[in-house]
Each structure stands twice: as C-alpha cells, then as structure tokens.
Image (cartoon, rainbow, N blue to C red):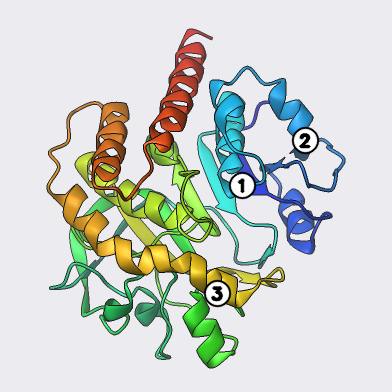
Amino acid sequence: MKKSNRVIVITTINDKSDGIREFESLKGWHTVLVGDKKSVSIESNDSLTFLSWEEQLDLDLNYVKLCPWNHYARKNIGYLYAIKAGAKIIYDTDDDNIPYLKKWKLPEFKCNKLISNNSKFVNMYSYFTDELIWPRGLPLDEIHTHYEKVEVSENHKRIGIWQGLADNDPDVDAIFRLAFKKEVVFKKNEHVVLSKGLYSPINSQNTFWHSNAFPFLYLPAFVNFRATDIYRGYLAQKLLWHLDYFVGFTGATVYQERNKHNLMQDLRDEFECYFNIKNIIKIIDKIELTSDSHANIKLLYESLSEEGIISSKELDLLDAWLIDFMNISDTKKND
C-alpha cells in the first residue's frame, strides 16, 4: 500500500460489495479491506488494499498472532496497517454501507453546537428524527431519553470522533428490527457535539476518527460481535473528554443495504449490551485518568476485567495492540 493520510477500513468475508466499490472510487482516500479465513479474495489495486489472512501473518505485528480468526476484531489489524501507512484520518465502516457520493465528505473536526441533557445518556437519533428509534447499544430504559436543547458555544469544541448516521436500515438493535420492520430516513440536521459527561452509542459503521483518537480505536475480541464497537465507543468518549476532545454526530451520509442476519442470534448477542452498559459507565466514571493515553486504556480495561465484564484474556490482546501501536508511532517519528 502506498502512503495515504486518509484511509477507509472495512472487514469483509464477501465478494466486493456496491459499498466497497463506491468507497474505492473516492478521490483522496485509500480503502483497506481486512479479510479472514472464510473471506472471498478481492484483488488489490491503487485505491484498495485487500489483506488476506496469509498476508496478515506476514505483517510485523504482535497483535496478529493473538487475535482470534473469524472475528470482527481483526479490524484492529486494518487500523494498525492504516496508521503505519501514514493515516491522519481513519474512516470506519462496513461492507454493506453505501455512501451518498454528493453528501459524503470529511467534516471539520470542530463544532460549536452542543447537545446538553440532565441525564447520563441521550438517544441521539431523537435529534435527527421524530420517529421512535434508538441506536444499538443504548440501554433499553434510556430509549425515550431525547435530547433537550442545542446550545451554541462561544468556542468550538475539538472533535475526536464524528459519528454519522445511516439511512434505510440504520444501526439499531434486534428488538427494533423484530418489532417494527421499517426503513428510516433521517432529517438533514446540522452537526452537533455531545457535552462532556453525556453518553450515546458510537458504532463502527459511519465513523471518522481523528489521529488524536487513534489510541482508542481498539476493538475488544472476547466480547460478542454485537457489543465490541459499542463497548469501544463508550470507553473512547471517557478517554477523549480527558484530552478535551469530544464526540460529534452528523446526519446520514450513507445508506445501508444490510447483509443477511439472524435477528434472533443478534438478540441473543445483544443481551450483553442491555445488561452491561450502565455498569460499565458507573465503573469508568469513577476512574481517575492520567496524562498517559495508553496507560488510561489499560486502566479502563483492567477495571472492567476485575468486575467480570471483560475477560482477562482481553488484556493480553490489548497489550499486544498497544505495543504495535507505539512501535508504529515511534517509527513514524524517526522517519
């Protein structure tokens, strides 16, 4: 892969989808596809790099040796690969999302329109639609916790992560899909930023990451597929606030033609989120962070492991990923 400061990272086990073709066509971006043992091989070209499982083993990365096969967390390899290639911005998405080419663009990493609420959580979909709908990973007893107001701040907040929405079949949980079975098109409202201490789920489907947030990209492997990016997102919010960065939300710049899912299996896998999220927030809110971002990530995961929410096996993978991340960062500084 040639050097690129804007990289799209996707995992796939399928043939090249319409979404991948559209992302591949975007000028100024390079697409990295992370394959797995059951992936269909896709040919690399000047705009796209397909990392087969054999090629992943040849990468000089500690994490590759420990990450389980056939797991969404292998996307972590794509992040490291992108960072090593010079990425300053990483766009996180899936192969069943298709960009609106006229609307899809990199937002500025600043915003002065601030969502505030008196609660700990907010259903951010309520800002973009009047329909009853909630994002995957929002505690079920918070789905009616709508945003209360938007304040215009005198100073722009620095954005570490932009979370975009998806039209048609947005990122919702299995309960919504089983109960309603309908497509949703969101309003084209202005970008907004969440105030410090206010949580809302962040997924891996239409998400821009600034380089200052790269240390927080890590997806846990010893959790259910439906929980991994949700857990990461909640931890990233806490870690970003400590650096005086924030999470912003944009309207839908992609639409989803969802890959085939077993909704009852999704429901079973999402139980973990329903019952763990509030405990996770209680735990991490009590933790005093340091000036070392890498130590802070370990501190959060160790605390969750001690409480039995995250497997202790996760800590070895996290260590390997952080070592790779720091080695890559040190190499880039010396280039």
- Quick one: label 3 or label 1, which is nearer the N terminus? 1
Q: Nearer the viewer, residue 324 or 192?
A: 324
Q: Position of residue 267 (x, y in %)?
A: 51, 73
Q: Which residue is mark 1?
A: 71
277 sits to left or right of 331: left
Q: Residues within 10 Å of mark 1 (few under 14, many from 20)?
A: some
Q: Residue at 71% x, 53% y: name it.
A: 23
Q: Is there CB contact under 8 Å for labels 2 and 1? A: no
Residue 202 vertical placement versus 1 (above, below): below
Please state which amino acid type lies under the numbered disc 1: His
Q: Secondary structure at mark 1?
A: loop
Of tags 3 and 2, the one toward the viewer is: 2
Asked whether residue 113 appears in the rendered view, the answer is: no
Q: Residue furthest top?
A: 334
Which numbered marker is on residue 52?
2
Please state which amino acid type lies under the numbered disc 2: Ser
Residue 121 vertical placement versus 299 (above, below): below
Q: Position of residue 299 (x, y in %)?
A: 25, 34
Q: Which residue is mark 3?
A: 170
31 sits to left or right of 181: right
